Amino acid sequence: MVTLDDIVSLSKRRGFVYPTSEIYGGLANAYDYGPMGVELLRNIRDLWWKEFITKRIDMIGIDSSVILHPDTWVASGHVDSFTEPLVEDKITHKRYRADHLIEADLKKRSEKISVEEMTRDEMAAYLLEHKVKSPDGNEISEPREFNALFETSIGVVSGEKSKVYLRGETAQGIFTNFKQILDSTRVKLPFGVGQLGKSFRNEITTGQFIFRTLEFEQGEIEYFFDPEQSKWEDLLNQWKLQMMTFVTQKLGVNTENVRWRQHTDKERSHYSRDTYDLDYQFPFGWKELWGVAYRSDYDLKQHAKHSGKPLEYSDPQTGKKFIPHVIEPAVGINRIFLMLLCDAYTKNDDGRVILKLKPDLAPYKVAVFPLLANKEELIAKAREVFNLLSEKFNTTWDDRGNIGKRYAAQDEIGTPWCVTVDFDTLSDSTVTIRDRDTGEQKREKIENLVSIFKDKLGK
């Protein structure tokens, strides 16, 4: 089974993910995405947007500001309740999430207790009873609530700056734009608004690579509906089905590695009637990938109350005015990224790594090689092939080392097909296509390459 160390090593070695600011010693819970990483992220984003926004007649998208009016976070409850229980190492003064220390302790004891359902007092009692220590083996403090919102300020004069927050989630920008969306479009219920963008949380958990980071990307949807016309249970199930279909069919993830987990009454937010997490089996255990919740009309009511502005929907047929209810599917794009690396990571019989990503998700679809890097006629012909393919597909060029090393490098970044230009190409205009997953090699005419790869990609 793949380990997190395998994924971290591959990510740095092949340019998927780097530790940020490494020349200065790095920064905890912060990472940069390298040349392969940005391509994979872009493919994930584009596929999510296509499947959940573009292809649906009942969906539209927005892109709200990262810095919203600070009252937004008061209304949403984030200022008062967006907290995590933290403990402090009494010697090193490092801080840790209490629930994560308890999870690690339960794992050592092979006990199955739901940490998600524990209150802060119950966590404190567990830590005391079992004498749980910090990862450094030192005594820890009692849990204290720590707000995960990032505070900053705007203004140029010291003492006259205003406190604001970097957004803790993308959802609130959808709710605060609800009236403007109604006024500027012709949408009618039921309809959804989706957004892709960065969120920020003062995260102190370490050791899970890009699973928990200070800065991350979300794909969130608020699906608005009239509870008198649509059953929330039906809508929730429809979203669950599309989410699972996206993960297992569009992303090609092994069905054995995903599961649904329903939140208990104790765990679920007070305004939610039902919440499910779509979990993935990461190397460090089953963890949430994607959540979907029925949030009733809580958010729009809160913003209407705090802003003093009406956030109602007027039914064009009946004239009835009311505040719509909401189903919210929310996913971490970076968690999808990590899931794909874990799920696609494979070793063949001789121990070589092959990243078996679905071809349409792979950073590059095709790699073009001249057989020899010191033969001008081969390089010139290979350039022609590269230019032909790069017009239609994300294509890379590689002329370093022998062919075997080039194949190995492309296998590790997930490139589905490699095209080699050799001396026969100069006489008969054929090239060798090598398949990543099977290792099979076939000769094909250059003039047929575009249609061959279009067929393979289903385009």
Image (tube, rainbow, N blue to C red):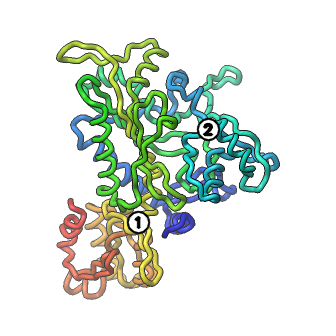
- Reading the chain from its start, which is encountered first: label 1 or label 2? 2
Find residue 64 and report its image quarter.
top left
Q: Residue at x 35, y 71 (%)?
A: 367
Badge 1 amino acid: Ala
Q: Residue at x 44, y 68 (%)?
A: 345
How many numbered marks have been drawn onto this rendered protein structure?
2
Q: Residue at x 30, y 43 (%)?
A: 52
* Viewer-nearest residue: 191 or 240: 240
Q: Which residue is mark 2?
A: 84
Task: Identify the element where label 1 is drawn.
Answer: helix
Say left or right for 207 vs 353. right
Q: Which residue is mark 1?
A: 344
* Viewer-nearest residue: 49 or 314: 314
**Where does residue 334 sit, x and y in percent of width and height?**
47, 51
* Viewer-nearest residue: 10 or 255: 255
- Is residue 98 shown above or below 348? above
**CB under 8 Å between callouts 1 and 2?**
no
- Residue 387 visible somewhere in the drawing: yes
Badge 2 amino acid: Glu
**Where does residue 353 sit, x and y in percent of width and height?**
45, 75
Give the class, few, some or many, for how many residues have Cα within 10 Å of label 1's Cα (few <14, many ≥20): some
Task: Identify the element where label 2 is drawn.
Answer: strand
Mark toward the viewer: 1 or 2: 2
**Where does residue 186 sit, x and y in percent of width and height?**
23, 25
Say left or right for 139 vs 455. right
Task: Give the Cα separation between the discs numbered 1 and 2.
Answer: 33 Å
**Where does residue 165 sit, x and y in percent of width and height?**
57, 30
